[in-house]
Each structure stands twice: as structure tokens, then as C-alpha cells.
Image (spheres, grey):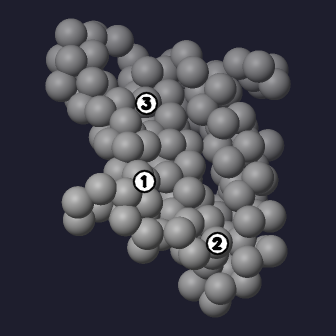
């Protein structure tokens, strides 16, 4: 069994096993994420803003726990950054500055494109640079 600070153990057939406590955390993460997005859709400001914290914290913990596998780390970092961008966008709508002009045709809502793009760059780095150069390393993807 893997300790709390390690990646799940591998079996002799190179399968990736996720300990139950990790899977439970991932499932709870989905619940928080859905509550955040439902609250956003229904304009329930306090709940939406409150759900940012557990959603984001759990995504960071998941990324940390899977850091030994570059494929997992890259995808989990992209998810964390996606949640950050998504949360900024939600707050910009809740507070009412989403449609205020930043410059030209761009509004403050468009600032969410920065973290969204960072997430895409992480995945582009993984698929375009790292993975082709590490073909023989054990990965989950």
C-alpha cells in the first residue's frame, strides 16, 4: 500500500492502481466541482464562491500526490488551472465586472483566457515535448 505522500503502487503487469482513499478524494472533488458550477448556473453567489476552495484545494492535493508520473501531473495541473480560470470567470460574473471593457473588444471575463492558455501550454508541453522524449518510461497515458 502506498503511503500518503507517494504515488499508488504498480503491480508486476505495470498497471496503475489508485488506492481507495485517493479515489474517494477524487470523487469528492467532482461533487464539490459540480456544486460550484450548479451554484454558478443558479447564481447562488455564496455557495459558488465557497465551493471554489474545496474544489481547488483538492485538485492541488491530487496533483501533488500524482507528481511522480508526468502524465498525471500534467493533466492534474491543467485541471487545477482550469478550475482557477473557471472560478475567476464565475466571480467576475457574480461581482458584475465580467462585461466591463478591459481594452478593445476584450472584457475582464477574457482574462480567464490566461490561465486557460497556461493549462493548454502544460498539456502541449507534455504531449509535444516530454512524452515523445520519454517513450520507454512508465506513464498512465
Q: Secondary structure at mark 1?
A: helix
- Viewer-nearest residue: 48 or 111: 111
Whether residue 80 is visible here, answered yes or no, is: yes
Q: Which mark is residue 95?
A: 2
Q: Do labels 1 and 3 touch, CB within 8 Å?
A: no
Compared to residue 118, the image places residue 1 above or below, namely above
Q: Residue at x 60, y 32 (%)?
A: 63
Q: CA distance from mark 3 to mark 2?
A: 31 Å
Residue 44, position as x, y percentages in the image: 73, 84
Q: CA distance from mark 1 to mark 3?
A: 19 Å
5 left or right, relative to 33: right
Q: Do labels 3 and 2 touch, CB within 8 Å?
A: no
| Mark 1 Cα shell of 10 Å, populated few (<14), some (14-19), many (≥20) | some
| Mark 3 Cα shell of 10 Å, populated few (<14), some (14-19), many (≥20) | many
Q: Nearer the viewer, mark 1 or mark 3?
A: 1
Q: CA distance from mark 1 to mark 2?
A: 15 Å
Q: Residue at x 24, y 32 (%)?
A: 124
Residue 35, position as x, y percentages in the image: 70, 74
Name the residue that disc number 1 marks. Answer: 112
Name the residue that disc number 3 marks. Answer: 74
Residue 17, position as x, y percentages in the image: 59, 35
Total labels: the figure holds 3
Q: Do labels 1 and 2 touch, CB within 8 Å?
A: no
Q: Residue at x 43, y 69 (%)?
A: 100
Whether residue 79 is visible here, answered yes or no, is: no
Residue 104, position as x, y percentages in the image: 23, 60
Q: Residue at x 42, y 53 (%)?
A: 112
Q: Earlier in the sequence, mark 1 or mark 2?
A: 2
- Viewer-nearest residue: 87 or 6: 87
Q: Secondary structure at mark 3?
A: helix
Amino acid at each position: 500500500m502506498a503511503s500518503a505522500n507517494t504515488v499508488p503502487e504498480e503491480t508486476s503487469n505495470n498497471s496503475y492502481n489508485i488506492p481507495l482513499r485517493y479515489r474517494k478524494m477524487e470523487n469528492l472533488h467532482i461533487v464539490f466541482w459540480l456544486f460550484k458550477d450548479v451554484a454558478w448556473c443558479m447564481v447562488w453567489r455564496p455557495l459558488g464562491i465557497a465551493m471554489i476552495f474545496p474544489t481547488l484545494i483538492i485538485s492541488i492535493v491530487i496533483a501533488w500526490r500524482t507528481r511522480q508520473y508526468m502524465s498525471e501531473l500534467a493533466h492534474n495541473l491543467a485541471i487545477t488551472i482550469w478550475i482557477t480560470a473557471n472560478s475567476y470567470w464565475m466571480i467576475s460574473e457574480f461581482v458584475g465586472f465580467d462585461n466591463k471593457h478591459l481594452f478593445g473588444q476584450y472584457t475582464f471575463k477574457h482574462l480567464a483566457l490566461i490561465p486557460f492558455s497556461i493549462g493548454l501550454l502544460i498539456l502541449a508541453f507534455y504531449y509535444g515535448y516530454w512524452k515523445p522524449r520519454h517513450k520507454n518510461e512508465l506513464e498512465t497515458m
